Amino acid sequence: MAALKNKQSKGQRTNKLELHPRNPHQARYDFALLADSCPELSHYIKLNQYGNESVDFANPAAVKTLNRALLSHFYGVAFWDIPPGYLCPPIPGRADYIHYLADLLANSNKGVIPRGKSVRALDVGVGANCVYPIIGHQEYGWQFVGSDVNPIAVATCDTIIKSNACLKGAVSVRLQNNTATLFAGIWKEQERFDVVLCNPPFHTSEAAMQDESKRKWRGVKGKESTKSTTTKPVLNFGGTAPELWCDGGEAGFVSRMIKESVHYSDRCFWFTSLVARQSNLDAIYRTLKEVGARQIKTIEMAQGQKISRFVAWSFLQDNQMDYWQDNYWAP
């Protein structure tokens, strides 16, 4: 058995607060250009306290419209919408994950990013927004399968896919009917994925989520809320229960994912998951060691002042990785 390789990689950034070099969202938003792609955005553009054009990021409608404009302008998505209350993620951070995943695959492919429909990705918990598959396919031509336990989320993704010619035949979504499993019932027999990605539920309970939301809300507003502390704050980025919390929180979810991944060890090149809280890494590393992961990497990312990371693991030996790249990623 090959020795366990536990590598903590911090990417190629010299400034940890910069987005990935290939991320098109590094510059300040050009709201005039974005409004050209999505005229509705003009209703939300205003001057901030510094005299710059911006939108009110405490306004869920403004955030959703900004996302619609970004997806239209940068990724050619003609139609995008999500139901009220569903997670509306910041696009720049989502794009960063995709670009670092591309680097992860390139590092196993003589520095060349595998592109096109031969590369297949599984997005565990795709949500209603379908953002990772949109970016991954439009940037690298990858084929995506998204899974989710929420039938409304799956139906919404399906509508987005069917409404955009660029996504048809490249992205599909599957409903996970068994909430006790992540891969079983989704991963078909003999199906192969080059990369699995996941943005796991962060919180351990609704109460913990509400406490964190109140803290973030005060940061967005720049002052203490004058409302009662029992009032639920508006979640400007939204989110439903399965998207935001689960038993054991982030560490518990990722650990379950790791244990299940053993059953698909020879049918995936890299399993990965975002890990928002650094303190959860030790428990995740222990689980990876317990299941016999052969290769482990932790890759840091950043957006503004926020530092995040994803953990990647593989059960393949070096010769198996060589076979995979030669047979599945050939130009």
Image (cartoon, rainbow, N blue to C red):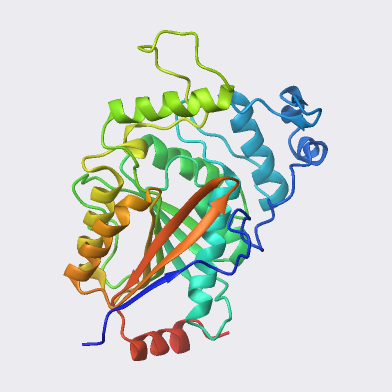
The quadrant of the picture occupied by the N terminus is: bottom left
Residue shown at 69%/52% (left/top)? 26
Residue shown at 32%/51% (left/top)? 279
Lateral position of residue 273 relative to residue 26, left or right: left
The quadrant of the picture occupied by the C terminus is: bottom right
How far across and how far down the image is residue 7, in percent? 39, 74
| 113 up-or-down from 21: above or below | below
Say if residue 169 shows up in the picture. Answer: no
Residue shown at 28%/73% (left/top)? 190
How far across and how far down the image is residue 30, in percent? 79, 41
How far across and how far down the image is residue 112, in percent? 58, 80
Lateral position of residue 231 relative to residue 160, left or right: left
| 45 up-or-down from 202: above or below | above
Identify which residue, 233 or 199, lies in the foreground: 233
Say if residue 308 shows up in the picture. Answer: yes
Lateral position of residue 43 relative to residue 234, left or right: right
Can you tell which quarter of the image residue 242 is in? top left
Lateral position of residue 304 relative to residue 258, left or right: right
